[in-house]
Image (spheres, rainbow, N blue to C red):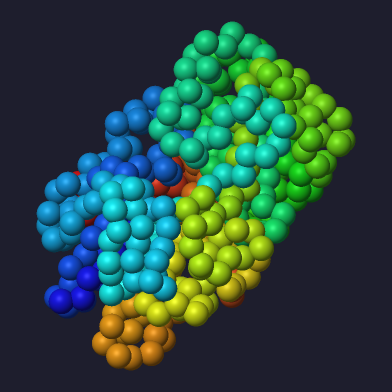
Amino acid sequence: MHRITVVGSGFAGLTAVRRLRASGQDLAITLVSPRPELIYYPGLIWVPCGLRTGEDLRIPLQGFFHRQRVTHLAAEAVGLADEGRTLLTTAGPLPNDGLIIGSGGRFLKKLPGIEHAITPCEGIPAAIQIRDRLREMRGGSIALGFAGNPNEPSAMRGGPMFEFLFGIDNQLRQENRRERFRLVFFSPAEQPGNRLGPKAVKGLLREMQRRGIETHLGHKLKGFTATEVLTEGGNFAADLILFMPGMTGNLWFDNTPLPRSPGGLIQADAHCRVPGFERVYVAGDSGSFPGPEWMPKQAHMADLQATAAAANLLAELDGRAPTKTYRVELVCIVDSNQSGMLVARNQRYSLILPSLRLFHWLKRGFEWWYLRPYR
């Protein structure tokens, strides 16, 4: 029986488990993560307005692990030994015949004063903090923005910031207090969201203008204070700052011999295999993958990469060469709590459909469908 270790209980790790088990092979699967739970990050956008609570988005996985015959090790990865055949964890060494790393990424927090900004996608506590701050505010300026990793163009997560922006705008309107607030969207990019496609950028900026949202674009960020966003193009007031930095690799990667990209992620080939290491694969935010510059860091892409990683690991265990690749595809609904704009892009076309209530309900329906196997 082959022993397979999966690191991480996020989208990549859990998809890898499902694909491995669906193969029908006799496998001993161990998943390593601090807690047996999945945090459904796409739903964080609905916490400030009350459509979701934090516990709605925290999915216990004990039942899923039992059904999938997975051993959960409540620990954190801290390093590798034996050319990848032993994962070092806070609970001790864990030997394997194959390894899939899906432990996510880490936000770059190097800007001076970044402690004054809330990073929404850090998890449930951040979303709750945003909710509580909005409830306390009687007016003022709210600044929302994102930046990337200059050494890793794909290592950014800007989409949710558009959703928080439009969602907060809608929330304040529903509460009949939008006129008391100034909303400012900022980014060092002149065309923020360009990975969604040129049409999407125009549509997003047009929507901001329609809603009376100010923009501060194309200026390098210098830092934050408790009351300001500082940029090379000037500073502006902000009583609440929501900021999504670029991403890099987990700290534990530093304690491994795995090859790294310029941006600090684990280097992968087109089969999600880590070059120079037998039966070691990576999927999702942990990895740097070949593909177009607009290749997204999102759950859908993590699922596609994890599917390829699982298939190729099984092939290697069976003595065959890995051949499965992943398709590069961006699919998202930019939601505003009431309606949503559909954006889709692959290597053949780019599509954007205007904001409709239908897309909001499709996003909520997808959440139910996606989480059903884990409940």
In which quadrant of the rendered image does the N terminus lie?
A: bottom left
Vertical placement of 121 versus 76: above or below? above
The one nearer the camera, 199 or 272, is 272
Q: Is residue 284 visible?
A: yes
Percent x, y of residue 340: 50, 43
Residue 159: x and y, percent? Answer: 57, 47
Labels in figure, total: 0
Compared with 329, 110 (above or below) is above
**Looking at this view, is 193 or 349 the one in front?**
193
Q: Quadrant of residue 14 in the image?
A: bottom left
Judging depth in this view, the residue of 171 and 263 nearest the camera is 263
Question: With respect to residue 63, does 2 lie above or below?
Answer: below
Residue extending furthest toward the bottom: 320
Q: Position of residue 21 (x, y in %)?
A: 20, 69
Q: Is residue 355 above or below residue 200?
A: above
- Could you say which quadrant of the image residue 37 lies in? top left
Give the residue displayed 51% in from the left and 78% down from the top. 275
Image point (26%, 87%), residue name: 318
Residue 350 visible? The answer is no
**233 left or right of 345?**
right
| Residue that protrudes farthest toward the right in the picture | 233
User: Where residue 167 sits in the image (x, y, percent)?
Assistant: 53, 32
- Residue at 31% x, 84% y: name it: 315
Left or right relative to 145: residue 265: left
**Residue name at image x 53 percent, y 64 percent:** 266
